[in-house]
Image (cartoon, helix red, strand yellow):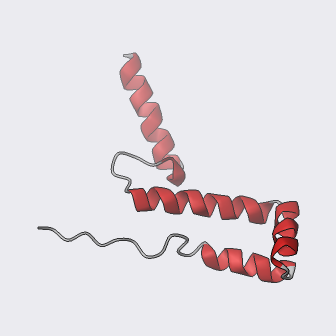
Amino acid sequence: MDRFNLNSQLEHLQSKYVGTGHADTTKHEWLVNQHRDSYASYLGHNNLTHYFSIAEGESIARVRFNMLEKMLQPCGPPVIKKDI
C-alpha cells in the first residue's frame, strides 16, 4: 500500500512540475530544464543580474536580454536519434 501511495505522489509531482522529470526524460531535456531553471533564478534575483553585468562589462538590460535569449535553447537543438 505504501509503495502505491509513494508512486502516485511521485507521478503527481512529475505531472505538476515539468523540471522533476520522469522515466522517459532524455538527458537533453534534463539539461535544458536545469539551464532554464538557473537562468530564471539569475533573472529573478536582481543582485545576481547586477553581478553578471559588472563581471561582463555590459549593461543590466543587455545581460537580461542575453539570458532571456539563452533560455530559448540553452543546450542547443535536441539530438535527433535515427532508428537503425
User: What residue is shown at x 41% (from left), y 32% (from top)?
Assistant: 8
Q: Quadrant of the N terminus?
A: top left
Q: Quadrant of the C terminus?
A: bottom left
* Left or right: residue 2 compared with residue 71: left
User: What residue is shown at x 64% (from left), y 79% (from top)?
Assistant: 69
Q: Is residue 53 above or below residue 43?
A: below
User: What residue is shown at x 37% (from left), y 56% (from top)?
Assistant: 26
Q: Is residue 42 above or below residue 58?
A: above
User: What residue is shown at x 40% (from left), y 46% (from top)?
Assistant: 22
Residue 31: where, in percent of width, then height?
Answer: 50, 59
| Marker count (numbered) | 0
* In-front residue for pair 14/60: 60
* In-front residue for pair 44/35: 35
Toward which corner of the image does residue 6 lie, by quadrant? Answer: top left
Toward which corner of the image does residue 2 lie, by quadrant? Answer: top left
Q: As drawn, which residue projects farthest toward the left?
A: 84
* Left or right: residue 78 compared with residue 62: left
Residue 78: where, in percent of width, then height?
Answer: 39, 71
Residue 75: where, in percent of width, then height?
Answer: 50, 70
Toward which corner of the image does residue 55 lie, by quadrant? Answer: bottom right
* In-front residue for pair 24/49: 49
